[in-house]
Image (cartoon, rainbow, N blue to C red):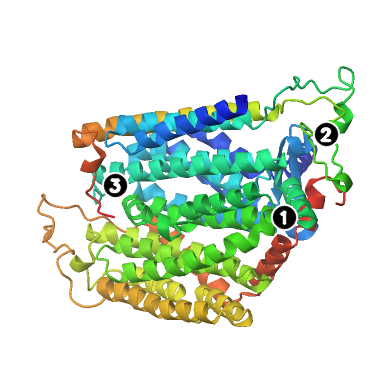
Amino acid sequence: MTEVFTALTISLVFGIGVYMLLRRDIFKIVIGFNLISQSINMAIVTSGIFTGVRVPILEEAINEHAAFIFADDFANGIFAPIVTGMADNPLFVDPLTRALVLTAIVISFATTAILLTLAYCINEEFGTTDVDELRRLRG
Amino acid sequence: MISVFLWIESFILSHIVMMPIAVGLLMAPVMLFLRNKPKTQKVTAMIASALLLVFASVLFWTVYQDGIQTYDIGEFGKYGIVLVGDMLSALLVLLTAFIGLSVLIYSFDYIEKQSLSTSYYPLYFLLLAGIFGIFLTGDLFNLFVFFEIMLLASTGLIMANEKLNVTDSAHKLEAAYKYVIFGTIGSFVMLIAIVAIYASVGSLNMADLAAKIQFIAETGPIPWTIIGAALLFIVVFGSKAALVPFQFWLPDVHPTAPTPISAILSGLLIKVGVYSILRVQFLILYPAKDFFLPILMFFSLITIAVGAISAMGQTDLKRVLAYSSVSQIGYILLGLSFGTTAAIAASVMYLVSHAISKSMLFLIAGGIIHETHTRDLRKMGGLITVLPFFSMAFLLGAMSIAGFPPMSGFISKFALFQSAVSGEFWLQLLIALLMAVVTIFYMFRTWIAVFWGENKGSLKTDAGTSVSNTGGPLKKHHISLEIVLPIAVLCAAMILLGLYPEPLYEISNMIAIQILDPTAYITTVLGGVPR
C-alpha cells in the first residue's frame, strides 16, 4: 500500500513541476525545475526501499549475511548487491540510493543558483521575467 | 634529485587515468586565486594546458601499448567510482586536450581582459575537467555528475565577453537561458533513466551493468524498464548531440557564444553526446539494440537533411557553421546506427575529423569577425586580398567538411559510405550522398560569399572610418600570432590525418571491436574475474 502512495506522490509532484515548467514567468519555471528534481529524488530513494526490510549494516562481525550480499551468483541468476527476493534471508534497504540522492540534491542546488542568477540578469537586461519576451534570436 | 624525478614519474604513471581530471579540477581554483595577476595567470594556464596534452598523450600511449587501464577511487571496487581508460576514452581525451590547448591560445587575444581573468580561465578548466571526466568515467551516475559540471561551466563560458562587441549581451543571456534550461531537462531525463536501470539491475558500474544485462538478455526477455531506459538515454544524448527533434537550441547557442567557446561547443561538446551513445547504448544496453537502432537511424537521417538544408539559407557566418554541425552530427550518428564494426570505426574517424575541422572553421570565423566587425555574410565579400591566410585555411576546412580528397573529411566520409555499401543500406546511402552534395554547396557558398567578389561595406577605409559602423573611428586590430597559430596547427593536423590516415583508421577499428565485444572491458574492470 505504501508503494502506491509513494508512486502517487512522486507522480503528483512531477506533474505539478511540469505544469510550472510551462508557465511564462522564469521564477515559476525555476520552481518547476525544483519540484521535478525533488520528485526524481524521491524516486531514487524509493528505488532502494521495499516493505519489511532492515537497515543495512554489512560487516561480517555484525551481520552474518554480509558475505553473500556482495557476491554475484550468475549461475543462479543472482546479482549483487542482494537486497530483495531472498526467501530464507532477511531483506535489506539499499544503502547506495542515499549517496546518489545527496549528489543529485547538491547538483540541483547548483543548477537552481545558476538559473536564478540568469533570471535576475534577464530581468535587468530585458526589464521582464516573461520568457515570451525572449525572442530576439529567432532560432 | 634524480630520485625525486623518478618518484614523480612513477606517481604520474600510476595515476595517469586520474591525471587529466585532477589537473583540470585543480586549475579552476588556482586560476581564481591568480585573478589579480593576469601575466602569471596566462603562463600558468598555458603550462597547465600543455601538461594536460602531455598527460593525455601518455594515457593514450599507455592504453595503446598495455590495453585498458582502470583506476579505483576509494577502494570500493565496483560499488565505488571506477575510472576506465579504454581506446575510445583515450583517443577522445587526446583530442580534447589538443583542441583545448589550441582554443586556449586563441582566447588569449580574443576574450576581453576582465572577463578572461575573473571567470574565463576557471570555467574553462572546469569545462575541460568535466569533458575528461565524461570520457574516463566507468560509472553511470558519475557520468551524470560530470555532465552537470560540463553543463554549468559551459553556461558560464557562453556569457563571457569578447573584445569586439559583435554580439550584444541580451542575445547571450537568451542563448544561455535556452542552453541551461534544455540541458537541465536533459539531466532530469538522464537521472530518471539511470534510476530505472539501477532499480532493475542493481548496479551502476558500466562493466558490471554490461555483464548483467548481457546475462539477462541471454536467459530471457529483456525487462521493459531497460528498454525504456535505453530510449530515454537516446533522448538525453540526442539532445546533447543535437539530434533533430532536439536540435533547435544549437543554432542559437553556438553562434552566440564567444568564438573560442563556439569552437569548443561544436568541436567537443556535441561529440560528448556521440561518445555517450557509443558508451552507454553500445556497451551497456546493446541487447536492446533492436529497439533503439532503427529510431537512431531514422532521426539521424532527418538530422542530416534538416541541418544541411537549413545551412543553405543562412546569412550569418557562424550560424552556417552551427547548422553544418547539426548536419555532420547526423552523419556520425548514422554510422553508429548501422551497428557494424566498419560503420562504427568510420563514425569514430568522422568524429575526430569533424572535431578538428569544425573547431578550425569556427576559429577562422572569429578571425574574420575580428577584421570585419560583423557576422553578416551579406556585408562581407572580397576578403581574399585582405586575409589570404584565412581564405586558404577556410577553403581547406570547407573541403574537409564537404569531403574532398586530401583532407581528413574525405577519408571518414569514404569509410562511412563504404560501410553503408557493405551493410547494404541503400536508401540511407542515397540520402547521405544527396546531402553530401548539399554540404558542398553550402560550404563553398559561404567561402565565396566571404572571400570572393566585391566587399559590401564591412571593410574599413584607410581614413579609419567605417561604412557599416558609424559609431566613431574604429581602431584597427591586427591579426596576432595567438590567433594564427592555433588555426595553423589545427589545419596541419587536418591535412596530416587526410594524407596519412592509417593510424587513425587502425585505432578506430580497434575501438569498434572493443565496443562491440566488451569482454575485455568487463574482465579488466571487474578485476580479472571471467564471466
Q: Position of residue A92 (x, y in %)?
A: 76, 25
**Chain containing mark 2:** A
Q: Which mark is residue A70?
A: 2
Q: Residue furthest front?
A: A1
* Badge 1 or badge 3: first in the primary sequence: 3
Label 1 environment density (alpha carbons within 10 Å; few <14, some 14–19, many ≥20) = few
Q: Position of residue B494 (x, y in %)?
A: 51, 69
- For label 2, the SS is loop
Residue B260 or residue B283, whichever sits in front: B283
Residue that mark 1 sits on? B221
Instruction: Give me the residue at 87% from left, 52% from top.
Output: B530
- For label 3, the SS is loop
Q: Give the distance between the C-alpha atoms of the residues marked 1 and 3, in whole angstroms.
A: 59 Å
Q: Amino acid at mark 3?
A: Lys
Residue that mark 3 sits on? B163
Q: Give the distance between the C-alpha atoms of the residues marked 2 and 3, in whole angstroms.
A: 57 Å
Q: Is residue B424 left or right of residue B171?
A: right
Q: Is residue B130 left or right of residue B62?
A: left
Does mark 3 fall on the same chain as mark 1? yes
Q: Height in image: B353 above or below B200?
A: below
**Chain containing mark 1:** B
Q: Is residue B159 left or right of residue B338?
A: left
